[in-house]
Image (cartoon, rainbow, N blue to C red):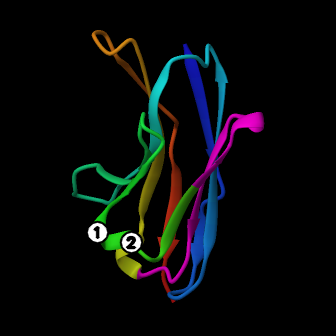
Amino acid sequence: QVQLVESGGGLVQPGGSLRLSCAASGSIFNIIDMGWYRQAPGKQRELVAVFTSGGTTNYADSVKGRFTISRDNAKNTVYLQMNSLKPEDTAVYYCKAKQGPLWHTTDYWGQGTQVTVSS
């Protein structure tokens, strides 16, 4: 089992910044990918940014150039730095880790943290 705990959400004005953190604990091995997703009211959950198994990063087109995913392996923590926030970034942000093996993967989700961008 992998436990994920997000933090760092809140209310911010348009153009502002927030940094989200996702701390992983438990049986942290064979993690294939790990990253951030979000879900706005009435919409499907979507990928925001993720570290892939190859060590590369993928971003949603809507956040490229504004958001940056990073990690601290010593702390088993993944971060999402969000700059130039827009009202359309308002959503619950979830951390997800996919654990292998490849022929039998398991997705673990955090509880989510609310990000609200409003003046």
| Residue ID for mark 2 | 64
Q: Is residue 88 magenta?
A: no
In the foreground, 76 or 118: 76
Secondary structure under the numbered disc 1 in the rendered image: helix
The answer to whether residue 85 is above or below residue 1 is: below
Give how far across and how far down residue 29 sits, in percent.
57, 16
Residue 29 falls left or right of residue 102: right
Give how far across and how far down residue 83 sits, in percent.
55, 77
Q: Do tag 1 and tag 2 residues touch (Cβ < 8 Å)?
A: yes
Residue at the image position 42 percent from the left and 82 percent from the top: 86
Q: Quadrant of residue 12?
A: bottom right
Q: Quadrant of residue 43?
A: bottom left
Numbered label attached to residue 24: none
Residue at the image position 51 percent from the left and 89 percent from the top: 119
Q: Amino acid at mark 1?
A: Asp
Q: CA distance from mark 1 to mark 2?
A: 5 Å
Give how far across and how far down residue 28 sits, in percent.
61, 19
Range shown magenta: 70-86
| Residue furthest front in the image | 54
| Residue furthest left in the image | 43
Q: Quadrant of residue 92?
A: bottom left
What crowding class fits label 1: few (fewer than 14 Cα within 10 Å), some (14-19), or many (20 or more)?
Answer: few
For the N terminus, the quadrant is: top right
What crowding class fits label 2: few (fewer than 14 Cα within 10 Å), some (14-19), or many (20 or more)?
Answer: few
Q: Give the number of marks.
A: 2
| Residue ID for mark 1 | 61
Secondary structure under the numbered disc 2 in the rendered image: loop
Q: Amino acid at mark 2?
A: Lys
The answer to whether residue 106 is above or below residue 36 is: above
In the foreground, 42 or 79: 79
In the foreground, 92 or 66: 66
Q: Is residue 79 magenta?
A: yes
